[in-house]
Image: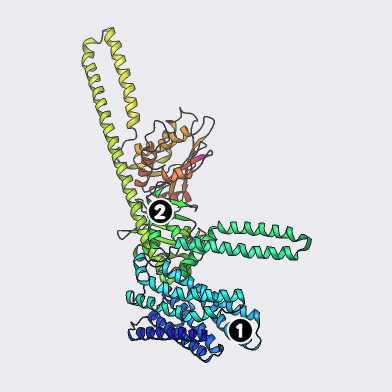
């Protein structure tokens, strides 16, 4: 009776799966998954027909029947793999470049096929119970793989797409669930339950209507949203840690079992070391970086989750925190797992100057905008791999890497920041924590992110320029009030002068006159101190620099510490406006005096370097930090003095640059500061020749 039930059960399954496969072949839509579905249905129909024949003839299962059962399960697994990771082309490269889980499952299927052949032969000839358990365990493993793939396919589908594939997932999942039930029971009781086996055909046949509904609803079987990279990263980390701990626990048990008297001690020490190693690996930036790259490369068609990357990038640029330049380069560096970066921005001086840095020490060098390197960045807009730059220099039109850039030992990429077709600046990125292939996707992402960062930085520069303009407007307004005060003083003095002839012999008038003059002088001194930084007519003449320095230093001699002047080269001529140059040098000397204690030293030195005169103002004062020098020293209206207006150093740099010179500063907190004014010598060739004689 049970044999007739089994025959009828598998015969029904064979017929319905054959009809479904014929339906699929007659409505073939030219897609690979359609072919694989039809093939899986044909294999299932052939397998069910073979088992029906065996039940009708009352013969034991042959090797052919066992292989067909394996082929049936493998067919459905391959169909699910194609749905999860559809190959673009059917060729050898697709197999070689397949994702790791595809290769692992494929290798398992091959091993299971070999085990099916061997175990069936062993069962036929030796009735080996151990091999029987291995064979049943392999079937359970195939069922588990099938259920996991069904779950992944359903979970990775969008909510809208699940409407079309939910019946297919129920049907295919039902096939694997029943197989799992059958072979788990067989492993538990060391034999196959004949009743469960006989009902298997009917159960499988019930899944055919579900598959037919899914085919009618969703002929494309397309996936929607992929699983989040963040979720997959944490899942892989969790499962990897669990597998690691299980392996270490097994190793610890082995040590305890075979370690004798030292077994327990060895086990505890080994497990403690294993946990410490796991913690180190979990908190290692390099390991986390490698895992992210591995997941993006092998589990996704694209390297980046663009939605997540763009949200993170925009949030980093927009949030409050450190300098915008530092936040921008950090956001760019994190796109390629780079641990450090530096930002260079084009300035009015005609150079790309260092602006911000993140975990990278700046060497203070600049790159001229009109250099070949900057022109290459602007014209080609390439992300330059410095290693490739050295190997394939011909590709880069023979442009050499600047010497200062080669000094950065970890420098890896140079990312141009393009704004409105012009080079706004560039970013130097350090070598990534893990190896990253610079393909089109990485380069395009860096370029578009660089443009976004450039727009933010340019907007900040515009805002700062507007703020400075408003501050200058406020300064001009203040000057207007000062002019008004001067006008009142002039009116008072004029009135005094007009009455002097009439009342000059009156003692009371004389006393009032002296009081008024004293008050006016004191008030004008205050006004002059405020206006001493104002602009004057730039009437340039040939100036003897040593005489100008003597006058500037003498004017500061009443202060303590008294500045010391060293003239190492006399009769040095420069072209400048005497008053303005004396004022800016005097300002630097005054700053040095105010920053230095009375027992310190302020030294002014005049030397020559080639065709340039160098005025060095050196003090042993409080000094300045590198961050202050980089961000605030040369900014107008920024001062560390209580009554300072923050104009002096800004004016000094502006005027030195107007003269075609350069202002350099080096400082160490608590040790002192050195300013260097470097100016071209007037008639330098003649003067150098005379000195040589």
Closer-to-camera residue (283/104): 104
Rendered location of residue 295, percent (x, y): 48, 66
User: Image quadrant of residue 635?
Assistant: top left
Under tag 1, what secondary structure? helix
Q: Which residue is mark 2?
A: 328
Question: Residue 159 occupies which quadrant of the picture?
Answer: bottom left
Q: Nearer the viewer, residue 429 or 561?
A: 429
Q: Residues within 10 Å of mark 1 (few under 14, many from 20)?
A: many
Closer mark to the observer between disc 1 and disc 2: 1
Which residue in the protein does label 1 denote?
A: 119
* Res 439 visible: yes
Can you name the residue that lies furthest to the right here? 261
* Residue 354 visible in the picture: no
Residue 118 location in percent, x, y?
61, 85
Q: Which residue is more in the foreground, 570 or 345?
A: 345
Q: Is 61 displayed left or right of 156 in the figure?
A: right
Is residue 305 located in the magenta-colored stretch of the structure? Answer: no
Using the image, determine if residue 428 lies above or below residue 127.
Answer: above
At a point 44% along the width and 75% down the height, the residue shown is 172
Q: In which image quadrant can residue 505 be found? A: top left
Residue range (magenta):
663-672
In the displayed structure, 545 sits above or below 193; it is above
Residue at x-position 21% and y-position 11%: 502
Q: Main secondary structure of the magenta part?
A: strand
Of callouts 1 and 2, the N-terminal one: 1
What secondary structure is marked by label 2?
Answer: helix
* Mark 1 → mark 2, Cα distance in angstroms: 62 Å
Name which residue lies at 50% across and 73% down. Answer: 101
Q: Is residue 25 left or right of residue 4?
A: left
């Amino acid at each position: 009776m049970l044999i007739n039930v089994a025959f009828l059960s598998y015969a029904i399954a064979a017929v319905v799966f054959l009809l479904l496969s014929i339906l699929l072949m007659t409505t073939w839509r030219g897609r690979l998954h359609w072919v694989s579905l039809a093939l899986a249905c044909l294999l299932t129909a052939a397998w069910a027909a073979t088992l029906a024949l065996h039940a009708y003839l009352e013969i034991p299962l042959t090797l052919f029947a066992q292989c067909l059962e394996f082929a049936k399960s493998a067919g459905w697994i391959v169909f699910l793999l194609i749905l999860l990771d559809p190959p673009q082309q059917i060729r050898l490269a697709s197999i070689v470049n397949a994702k790791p889980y595809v290769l692992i499952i494929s290798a398992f299927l091959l091993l299971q096929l070999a085990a099916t052949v061997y175990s069936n032969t062993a069962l036929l000839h030796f009735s080996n119970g151990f091999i029987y358990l291995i064979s049943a365990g392999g079937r359970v493993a195939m069922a588990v793989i099938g259920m996991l793939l069904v779950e992944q396919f359903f979970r990775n589908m969008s909510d809208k797409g699940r409407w079309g594939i939910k019946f297919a997932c129920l049907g295919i999942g039902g096939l694997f669930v029943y197989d799992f039930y059958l072979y788990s029971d067989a492993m538990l009781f060391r034999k196959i339950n004949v009743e469960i086996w006989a009902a298997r055909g009917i159960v499988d046949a019930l899944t055919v209507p579900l598959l037919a509904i899914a085919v009618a609803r969703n002929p494309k079987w397309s996936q929607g949203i992929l699983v989040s990279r963040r979720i997959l990263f944490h899942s892989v980390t969790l499962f990897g840690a669990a597998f690691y701990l299980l392996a270490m626990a097994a190793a610890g048990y082995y040590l305890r079992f075979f370690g004798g008297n030292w077994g327990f001690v060895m086990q505890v020490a080994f497990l403690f070391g294993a946990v410490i190693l796991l913690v180190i690996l979990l908190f290692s930036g390099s390991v986390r970086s490698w895992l992210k790259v591995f997941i993006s490369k092998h589990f996704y068609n694209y390297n980046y989750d663009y939605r997540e990357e763009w949200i993170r990038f925009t949030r980093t640029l927009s949030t409050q925190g450190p300098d915008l330049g530092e936040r921008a380069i950090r956001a760019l560096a994190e796109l390629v797992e780079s641990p450090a970066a530096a930002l260079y921005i084009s300035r009015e001086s005609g150079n790309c100057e260092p602006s911000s840095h993140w975990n990278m020490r700046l060497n203070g060098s600049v790159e001229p905008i009109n250099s070949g390197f900057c022109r290459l960045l602007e014209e080609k807009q390439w992300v330059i791999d410095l290693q490739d730059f050295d190997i394939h220099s011909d590709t880069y039109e023979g442009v050499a890497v600047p010497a200062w850039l080669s000094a950065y030992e970890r420098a890896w990429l140079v990312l141009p920041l393009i704004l409105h077709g012009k080079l706004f600046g560039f970013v130097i990125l350090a070598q990534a924590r893990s190896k990253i292939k610079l393909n089109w996707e990485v380069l395009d992402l860096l370029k578009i992110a660089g443009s976004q960062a450039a727009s933010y930085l340019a907007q900040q520069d515009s805002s700062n320029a507007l703020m400075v303009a408003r501050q200058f407007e406020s300064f001009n307004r203040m000057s207007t009030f000062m002019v008004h005060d001067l006008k009142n003083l002039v009116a008072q003095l004029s009135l005094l002068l007009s009455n002097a002839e009439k009342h000059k012999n009156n003692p009371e008038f004389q006393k009032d006159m002296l009081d008024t003059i004293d008050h006016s002088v004191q008030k004008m001194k205050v006004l002059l101190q405020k206006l001493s930084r104002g602009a004057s007519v730039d009437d340039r003449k040939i100036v003897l620099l040593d005489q100008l320095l003597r006058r500037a230093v003498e004017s500061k001699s009443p202060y303590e510490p008294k500045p010391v002047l060293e003239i190492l080269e006399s009769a040095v001529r420069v072209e400048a406006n005497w008053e303005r140059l004396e004022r800016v040098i005097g300002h630097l000397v005054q700053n040095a005096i105010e920053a230095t204690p009375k027992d310190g030293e302020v030294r002014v030195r005049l030397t020559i370097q080639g065709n340039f005169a160098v005025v060095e103002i050196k003090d042993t004062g409080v000094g300045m930090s590198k961050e202050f020098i980089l961000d605030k020293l040369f900014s107008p209206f920024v001062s560390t003095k209580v009554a300072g207006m923050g104009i002096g150093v800004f004016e000094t740099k502006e005027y030195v640059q107007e003269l075609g010179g350069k202002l350099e500063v080096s400082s160490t907190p608590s040790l002192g500061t050195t300013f260097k004014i470097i100016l071209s010598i007037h008639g330098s060739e003649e003067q150098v020749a005379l000195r040589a004689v």
